[in-house]
Amino acid sequence: MNVRLYGGAVMKKIVGILTGLAMLLMSVMLTGCGGDSGGQKAAGNVTLKAGFGSSIDNSSGGQGLKKFKELVEKESGGRITVELFGDGQLGNDKSMMEALQMGTLDITLPSSSPVSEFSKSFLAFDLPFLFTAPEQADKVLDGPNGQEILKSLETVNIVGLCYFENGFRNITNSKHPVTKVEDLAGLKLRTMQNPIHLETFKTWNANPQPMAFNEVFTALEQKTLDGQENPNTIIYDAGFYETQKYMTISHHFYTPYVLMISKKTWDKLSPEDQKLIQKCANEAKTYQRETNRRLDTEYLGKIKEHGVTVDTLSPEEIAKMKEEAKPIYDKFSGDIGKDRLDSIMKEAQ
Ligand code: TK8
């Protein structure tokens, strides 16, 4: 799907509604036969349905899912099929997780920030300026802290497979250049639905508006929002550059994606298939992170080509913003767990 089409809010809605209706019909039919839309027992063929909020073809998350599909289908000799639905056709990050809990969707790949509504320990990754390089994130996410946090999803009927990368977030807006924290004052910025993100932008005197991702393009277009914040790859893929004149490379948050599967689906798979899926997830992870890091630079170039003015925060300004946001670390250390937070901060050095 091309970027223009993705940007076309009406077209997107129509596609979404049609897909939704088709899915509903399918699940009614399956329930009618006493079936389930999840994976079936090991002997037969298994079809896994995966939903994602951004595009399958252009976003790094989508490309990671494609790689995962390719690996699973190859390794299983075609016995396991993965069907991909991008562009929020099946819902947003939160509603797709709820579908996983109910077993009406098998796989999804949300940003970790809305995942914190399901398990608070994920809040650890939302802290402002926690990571400065992607390798630090890899170390924490793939290490014991990241893996224990991933495991916490089992208490909400979801199995976490691994972390992909959404990446370092930057700020865009339609009003004026943002080169220092004072420039954020009063800006109506969309944030993810996450208490740390909300508090952080309040601390910087912006006017944060938590909102689901699939509502953002229209809100920017209709100017009910001044701006938003996302990694370069999403800003380009979602066509936000069409409505935004200014962009600031701020890297204020780092966002992992969480590749997850419904526990209902997981429990129906044989141990061999579970192993196969975990292995393919790990392989796709390496590919997806590499792809994201390449596209981060490539898509920034494309955003500039579209005429967006891009500024970069100075190290002094970053130090100032970090200092202002320090109380956030204390405020949320209870939810994250003090020992966990200390351990992550040590590991991230
Ligand atoms: C896509 C989201 C999106 C995220 C956001 O489903 O909501 O801003 O960055 O990429 O996960």
Image (cartoon, rainbow, N blue to C red):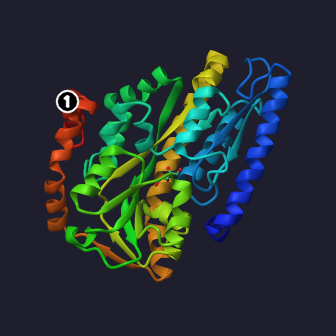
| Label 1 CB less than 8 angstroms from ligand 1 | no
Query: How many numbered discs sit on the rendered protein?
Result: 1
**Residue positioned 32% across, 62% down in the render:** 207
Q: Nearer the viewer, residue 77 or 263?
A: 263
Residue 182 in the image: above or below residue 306: above
Whole-percent x and y of residue 347? 23, 37
Q: Nearer the viewer, residue 245 or 189?
A: 189
Q: In the visual, does 344 lie left or right of 193?
A: left
Residue 294 in the image: above or below residue 134: below
- In the rendered image, which quarter contains the N terminus? bottom right
Q: Is residue 146 visible?
A: no
**Residue positioned 40% across, 44% down in the render:** 113
Element at label 1? helix
Residue lying at the far front in this picture: please name it: 224
Q: In the visual, does 41 lie left or right of 217?
A: right
The residue identified by callout 1 is: 338
Whole-percent x and y of residue 18? 77, 51
